[in-house]
Image (tube, rainbow, N blue to C red):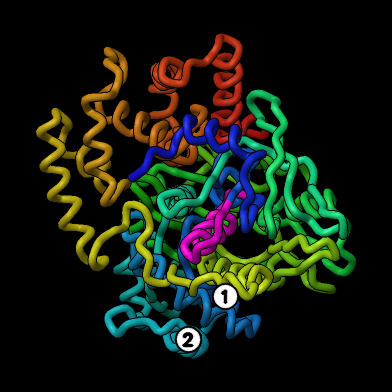
Amino acid sequence: MKPFSHTNRTHILQQLSSSHYDVIIVGGGITGTGIALDATTRGLKTLLIEMQDFAAGTSSRSTKLVHGGLRYLKQFEVKLVADVGKERAIVYENAPHVTHPEWMLLPFYKSGTFGKFSTSFGLQVYDFLAGVKSSEKRKMLSKEEVLKHEPLLNKNGLIGGGEYVEYRTDDARLTMEVAKKAHEEGADLVSYTKVTDFLYDNDGNVNGVTVVDQFSGTTYHAKGSVVVNAGGPWVEQVMELDEKIEGKQLLLTKGVHIVLDHSVLPLHQPIYFDTSDGRMIFAIPRNGKTYVGTTDTVYEEELVNPKITLEDKHYLMRAITTMFPEAFVGLNDIESTWAGVRPLIQQEGKGPSEISRKDEVWESESGLLSIAGGKLTGYRKMAESITNTISKKLKTDDFEAGPCITKTLRLSGGEFNKSSDYRPYVEDRAHELTKLGLSFQDGLNIASMYGTNTNQVAELVSRVKPSDELPLAIRLTLHYAIDFEMAMTPVDYFMRRTGALFFDIDWVEQWKEPVIDYMKDVLHWSLQETEQFVVELEARIADSKGYPEG
């Protein structure tokens, strides 16, 4: 695998003015990186520009599920459910190290949204639309069976339940593996570089972008035949650099999650349950924690770091108390939180939870393509669709882009012959990593996270800097993040390369200072830059803990 680091970033920026790209993508979330991968594998010279870190927006702040959206059947979104349902298995096969199948439990109650017949029929339709394999088809459970699975569930009015398979993921790491694969295939991707304006040809057509390095303040210009706006919640702001598109308006909604220690809410499997106001909530065990979410409220505030309010926490606490009355969970049990913003296409007369999650692509008079809506699960299909449009725009007598190959293209770290090879591989690599002086558990953690890139992580043992403060396992993953995942700041590492800021906040507090010192040495930060990154990390820790809202 080619290095993907600050050095690459600097080189790309320096040669921008002398390059011409077939396609320039604005936005480095799952949608933008997915387009970059599809485009570059079709033979298109591709540039992706991201104003923050990759996946810094919605793509690191979702419910962290590759799922088909069962609730959209209630809204008769049959095609959406069919498309994203089928995509679940594709994402899993191409990246089994960041996508894990788990049996989801859907309990139903006398006064609930779902009944025994509607649940059974809905799950059966879901299985059919998603093309679920026989071993993962839905199972219907009696009340007694449901309580045997999850004794903490509210017994009052419980009728039974259904079980079906969904896929747990790490959304930021999935985005990272897509970005790395796009880089391996020849795409240029740069983070912390903001598009501030568009360039135009003599006919008024968009043919490039003006960008500003967010670290140095240097301005660059990049030329491209097609420009794609995949800015997520910032789609409208990017469009306004060009022109306002009449009839297209985004509705931004906020989704909040809270994290508890597993001992506080000791669930055996993920649970999907409805609330008194008709929403659906997930409660998901993960690596010694249980996280619960999400909310769905209209959001009109700051996009970069959306805040969690006390009202958000109370809403989720009420849902937990109602569904798990014997758990006795309180606000003080919340260890960490996160909030994400969904960019939805406004639909007249529909509330936040009713709006379709399907994606939509439109083109301005200048030729700027913009995409919004959609779900994490459907990123590959969305990318295929918009790259088809790009290919048609670029087609000439002398050039035609190749076909889409991403359906069977393994992502970085996911280069297994089949997904079932992942588990034995992890065990084998974990044993091998102990020869470097790592514990078996550290070996398991590394092999599980990096998949077939594990050997590359291990090879850094001769290059990592010595440290009396940082254990070898952290130095290996940190140095890998810097050299091969373009981690530029401590927040990049703690939030989006490891997920620790959400799921192991105490670990972040324990190691933040030696990690900052290590990155300072490797990346040659000035005292001012170091202080800036310390302030940013402390702010994100405070956000994760939910301060100052309580």
Q: Is residue 123 left or right of residue 80?
A: left
Q: Where's the C terminus, which quadrant?
A: top right
Residue 117 in picture, x, y percent from top left? 48, 90
Q: Is residue 411 left or right of residue 464?
A: right
With respect to residue 131, does 531 lie above or below?
A: above
Amino acid type, mark 2 = Leu
Residue 184 in picture, x, y percent from top left? 40, 50
Magenta span of residues:
27-46
Residue name at image x 78 percent, y 56 percent? 206
Q: Where's the N terminus, which quadrant?
A: top left
Residue name at image x 68 percent, y 53 percent? 224
SS of the residue under disc 1: helix
Residue 347 in picture, x, y percent from top left? 80, 72
Q: Nearer the viewer, residue 109 or 288?
A: 288
- The chief SS type of the magenta part is helix
SS of the residue under disc 2: helix
| Mark with earlier residue (1, 2) | 1
Amino acid type, mark 1 = Arg
Residue 245 occupies which quadrant of the picture?
Answer: bottom right
Within 10 Å of the Cα at label 1, are there few (<14), some (14-19), or many (20+) other Cα atoms?
Answer: some
Q: Nearer the viewer, residue 251 or 172?
A: 172
With respect to residue 350, does 339 lie above or below?
A: above
Say which residue label 2 marks. Answer: 129
Q: Is residue 276 visible?
A: no
Residue furthest to the front: 398
Q: Is residue 534 visible?
A: yes
Say which residue label 1 marks. Answer: 71
